[in-house]
Amino acid sequence: MVPSFMRDKKSVLLVGGAGYVGSATTEQLIERGYHAVVLDNLYQGHQDAIHPAAEFIKGSISDEEFLDNLFGSREFFGAMDFAGETLIEFSMTNPNRYFQANVVDGLKLLNAMVKHGVERFVFSSTSAIYGEPQEIPMPETHQKYPGNSYGESKLIFEQILKWYHRIHNIRSVCFRYFNAAGASERFGEDHRPETHLIPLILQVALGQRNEIKIFGDDYPTKDGTCVRDYTHVYDLAQAHIAGLENADSLGHDAFNLGNGDGYTVQEVIQAARDVTGHAIPATIVPRRAGDVSRMVASSEKAKSVLGWNPKFPKIHQILETAWKWHLQNHKGYER
């Protein structure tokens, strides 16, 4: 049971709270006076990414009996879902991984919430639901044709949430974003394996790899490299908390999160050179299948409806926080 000194605080369940965006959101919830309950199986999350003031429960939402006991033992203000299968690598070879983790297990979580009367839900979704961009920046009304099973699984779950709102009154808010980046003083980005551009670039500056590979320089952009949107993990956390706190009035809604114009791969590398003072050698290699020239979100709706105002809108600001964390954690969360 929840200790007596915590009973006057609103408890929020963070599924996947030991992961990158989950840890940042946990930190900010605690700073705002919530009691954060982190549920994570540590498959992709890290024990050291769990805030010391959070209550940690190791477990999986795939276990229905476990979920029933968890929700039966506490009163939750709401739940946030940062879990599921996120590695894109296998999304075109093993779709079962994505539909099982992101749809089937997600349904088990929702059903436990319905049974125990927890009616606020925030879903960490993805811009991958849109597929090939037809307009830039991409609004929430953009056509939705996912190009892989990862994006399809997230879109299916968003549609499920619409029906759970209509039938079970689950007030749900979905956030679609491209590339989470940056760090707080305590928590940063550490994936195993690492596939994201910014930490890979910083590994070069740390001497952990010899160079950064640029996949194609013949795209129709200002310098021939792909343009992507980067959003600071602090700003993503702020949006998720705003979604939770406004869920009752929103009912069921979805928001894009991004910084507007996006940056080319070359611009990100140059910004990293500026911030780190390292030469960061880069080599052009052939394009990767499936990469598109520009992926940039319009976040005007989040700004107007939620009052979301990014604190770190510029790539140099994002990189400065990431570099500071990586300097202090050369091996990530590995001790």
Image (spheres, rainbow, N blue to C red):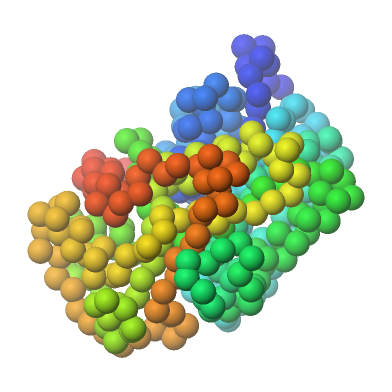
Please tell me how many numbered marks the rendered image carries. 0
Give the farthest residue toward the top: 5
Q: Residue 315: horizontal and vertical position, in percent?
A: 29, 54
Query: Eyeballing the image, is 82 above or below 85?
Result: above
Q: Position of residue 196 (x, y in %)?
A: 37, 63
User: What is the quadrant of residue 259 in the picture?
Assistant: bottom left
Query: Looking at the image, is 150 positioned above or below residue 184?
Result: below
Name the image quarter holding residue 84.
bottom right
Tell me which residue sits at (31%, 59%) in the image: 198
- Which is more toward the observer, 262 or 118? 262
Residue 283: percent from the left, percent from the top? 19, 79
Identify which residue is drawn at 52% across, 25% down: 32
Q: Nearer the viewer, residue 271 or 329?
A: 271
Q: For the point 50% across and 42% down, which residue is it?
A: 308
Q: Which quadrant is the C terminus positioned in?
A: top left
Taking 64 as reference, is 127 above or below it? below
Work out whether residue 4 or residue 318 is closer to the camera in this orientation and state it. Answer: 318
Residue 93 in view in this figure: yes
- In this rendering, would 324 be left or right of 311? left
Q: Is residue 224 left or right of residue 260?
A: left
The quadrant in which the N terminus is found is top right
Horizontal relation, residue 319 to residue 210: left or right: right
Write the residue at 65% across / 54% down: 254
Vertical placement of residue 237 versus 31, above or below: below
In this rendered view, identify the residue nearer to me: 16 or 114: 114
Q: Residue 86, percent across and down?
A: 54, 62
Asked if residue 65 can be seen in this view, the reply is: no
Res. 247 image quadrant: top right
